[in-house]
Image: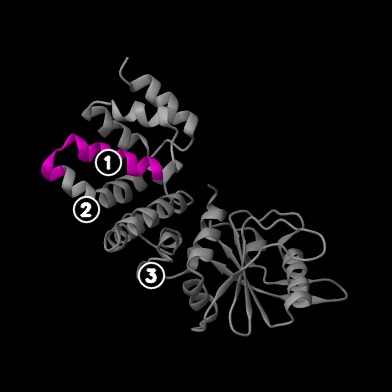
Amino acid sequence: MSTDNVCKLLAEKYPEDFARWLITVESPVKVLKTELSIEPIRADSVTFLQTKNRILHIEFQTLTKSTPPIPLRMLDYFVRLVRQYDVPITQVVIFLQEINNEIAFTEEYINEMTSHRYRVIRMWEQDSTMFLNNPALLPLAPLTRTDSPEQLLSQVAQSVAKIPSRESRQEIAAYTEILAGLKFEKDLIRRFLSEDIMRESVIYQDIEQKGEEKGKLLLCMLLLKKRFGNLESFIVEKVEVLPVEKLETLCVALFDISEIDDLIAWLEENGTP
């Protein structure tokens, strides 16, 4: 899953939190479809949120190059949204990864006949406090301003560990790890996020205390389901017959395995002959 799409998923799963952050509204918020009238335009990283009397258009960017260029695309979206919904529009481009390109500092489309303004948020300039205190925005916290990467990642891990729901904690942890990869090296992420989150989870504590093989298998299956969804039966069977030490190794290996083919190859190499 791309980092842009992780952000889109978060915005559409927690629309009220993103609306409160970007336009300070308390009214009910609903997600609009990303297809607009006239000719279709690429909307992979775009989210449209509708409040009582306004539409919030969020565009997530890791790169500055796009076709058409970002300023013109924002004007294009604006015109289409006004024609279709006829309400005030707030447009925000959120740059996730620190870059020096002038597009990341451009908030207006200008030509000789017209101009159009929109907002730009550069995550590397944002204070981390709000993001650390809101689970919906927490995956963005590693991208915020910091003088100490280790301290920031430690704070992020502590915030993730405080999420009461086990399912939500695992989900937010996964999103956070993906977005942290835009800014930090894998080893640093693993040292602070993966290890801390695992040790704070109820499942991990149960495993450490009981040392049960069944518990280790459960942990592996939960991680696999979170990463790949429902697995084919032959894969489940290969995991179920792994010895305890291999289950532990697989749990660690899953932080680097992102494709189902790589998982199958790992099981072929490490499974019981």
**Is any part of residue 185 visible from this angle?**
no
Magenta: predominant secondary structure element? helix
State the residue in front, 230 or 34.
Answer: 230
Viewer-proximal residue among 135 and 112: 135
The quarter holding residue 129 reads bottom left
Q: Secondary structure at mark 2?
A: helix
Q: In this image, 245 relative to 184: left or right?
A: left
List the residue tagged with mark 2: 202
Residue 51, horizontal then vertical, whole percent: 58, 80
Residue 24: horizontal and vertical position, in percent? 51, 82
Query: Residue at 40% of width from left, 73% of height from top?
Result: 130
Label annotation for residue 134? 3
Q: Secondary structure at mark 3?
A: loop
- How many angstroms separate mark 1 from mark 3 (CA)? 29 Å
Q: Is residue 192 left or right of residue 65?
A: left
Seen as rendered, the residue at the extreme top is: 273
Q: CA separation, marks 2 and 1? A: 12 Å
The secondary element bearing badge 1 is classed as: helix
Q: Position of residue 46 (x, y in %)?
A: 63, 62
Q: Would you call the spot at circle 1 few (<14 residues within 10 Å), some (14-19), or many (20 or more)?
A: some
The three-letter code of the residue at mark 3 reads Asn
